[in-house]
Image: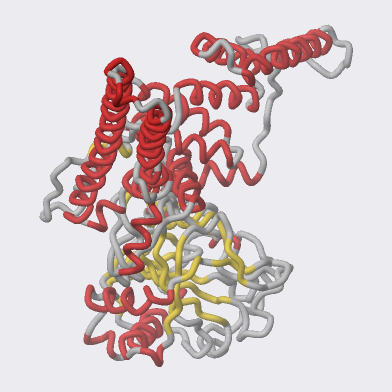
Amino acid sequence: MCSMVKISYVICFIALNLWTFTRGELFTAISEVEPLLETHRKIIDDLDDYINKEEKRLSILKRHLIKYRNEHEKAMDDIPNYLGNPINAFTLIKRLTTDLDLIEKNIVAGTAYIKNITVLNNHSDVKYPTLEDLVGAAQALTRLQDTYHLDVKDLSEGRLNGVIYRDSPTPKDDWIAVSTSMSASDCFELGKALYNEKDYSNALAWMMEALRKYSEDDEERTFTEVDILEYISFSHYLLDDVKKAMLWTRKLLELEPDHARARGNLPHYKKALDEKEANLKRRLRGDTGDVDIDEYIDDDNTAKKPVELSTYEKERKSYEALCRGELEISSENSKNLTCRYLTENHPFLKLAPIKMEYKYLNPDIVLFHDVLSDSEIEHIKELAKPRFKRATVHDSKTGKLVPAHYRISKSGWLKDEESPIIARVSRRVADFTGLNMMSAEELQVVNYGIGGHYEPHFDFARKQENVFKETNGNRIATVLFYMSDVAQGGATVFTELGLSVFPVKGAAVFWLNLHPSGEGDLATRHAACPVLRGSKWVCNKWIHQGGQELIKPCGLEYQAESVIRALPRPLLKTFR
């Protein structure tokens, strides 16, 4: 569009000059023709300027093309591994959102031209991510950063837990994948997305990284160093660090002395800082009578109250430590754990016993190995993909299914009648659990997204929750099949037990959700840890109380809906 304006300008300039000189019949005197040389020079300058700008525009587009092509080739070498890297996934979404907007400005017809071409060629399967996707990917990266204690600088350089993945993935190694370092623009857009979501602490960290990288690359940008400094200074202010907000604002003004917002912010920061210091002095003098000076001052001479962790915060710390594999179950429990072949529950198991491994006792958490074949896994995945929707949770007040920020995945449901393989999986669940499938829910297939997770929860409905009122009782048991290995992260953790179960492709973890009395067992509280790298596929079968009356009769002893602790009981009590 810019080039069209320039050409129009040149044409109008020539027409105006010709009209001016035509009135004086310039051809009748050489002296009147001489000014045309100035016109001639002006056209040369304008055309030269236009060509330079066009060459610059095309150079920018070529750089984008090279970057897109290189990344696409890396991705096509091993798609699951490439997209299983959260850094690659984020930068891909960024290239197709904010970067595409920059390309649009450098194409005469804009991105609409590209999109129109895909429509004209009937490429109905072409998808474009939205800014919501960009925000979700940004939040996923910070979730991984927080859970696994990742360093922002390491992440921006393509390192996940200290591992740099090579540029040439080989088919022989399932876990070698390209890891592209992030540019200043990537870091800036990530910080901006987090800032808009009011996550100022993480936004600040990424803006600092954007500033560090700003002078390292020569990419085309839609922002300046001043823009970065403004985000840094105001993030400090919103985090109640007024001194640093003033410091960074002054650095901004060194680059752009006339920056209106920065000049206006300085007196505002000064006033806020004066008020904060005055309040602190009053409190330290004992004017309010509620502060002990020895407990209230830290090294920076700022107010600091001792903080006691809430129940949620304590569980959160335990959950994240379990995700990192830092906690182990007690020796009292672990010394009694065994592995063996399951031959009971069904006559067929005498001929084809199933390998079982006890991961915990009381409540019994059992891992059954090799209960799904690769061909069954691929069939289930292909059947589920077309019906994938954002995973939901039961609203405790309404009982309805709703999406939630603490569960990031997509899922689909498969009925036994749809496929002999799905029916076979259900029969196999009945065989190794010894439970009736009459009241079992459909097979739920789940694929976790970028940093996909499901925070601590119960599978059963608690008394105060309006769930499963019209079904065959509460969820008595859970069977969770792992349909993929996961390179890093993605464990199933039991926060009350201190147990981490990491995905093993083809295996299934099983536990009972209820006490024999029918009351919920709070010890089964569990979570799906964020996937640090890889693609996590699972499917699960939730089994209800209906039909289990003779198989798992209710106990005569009442057990409250609480965590019951006892010494490890005899093996296989769960399955009798």
x 50%, y 90%: residue: 438
- Residue 54 percent coordinates (x, y): 28, 35
82 w.r.t. 226: above or below: below
Residue most extreme to the front = 28
Work out whether residue 233 or residue 152 is closer to the camera in this orientation and state it.
Answer: 233
Work out whether residue 356 or residue 175 is closer to the camera in this orientation and state it.
Answer: 175
Q: Is residue 453 left or right of residue 566?
A: left
189 w.r.t. 505: above or below: above
Residue 158 visible in the shown view: no
x 34%, y 89%: residue: 419
x 55%, y 23%: residue: 230
State the image quarter where residue 94 is shown.
top left
Q: Is residue 79 left or right of residue 21?
A: left
Work out whether residue 315 or residue 244 is closer to the camera in this orientation and state it.
Answer: 244
Work out whether residue 383 or residue 423 is closer to the camera in this orientation and state it.
Answer: 383
- Residue 70 percent coordinates (x, y): 20, 45
- Residue 516 percent coordinates (x, y): 59, 75
State the image quarter where residue 262 is shown.
top right
User: How does the figure colour the protein chain or chains?
Assistant: secondary structure
- Residue 488 percent coordinates (x, y): 32, 48
x 51%, y 36%: residue: 192
8 w.r.t. 518: above or below: above
State the image quarter where residue 482 is shown.
bottom left
Quarter that holds the N terminus? top left
Q: Is residue 245 left or right of residue 16?
A: right
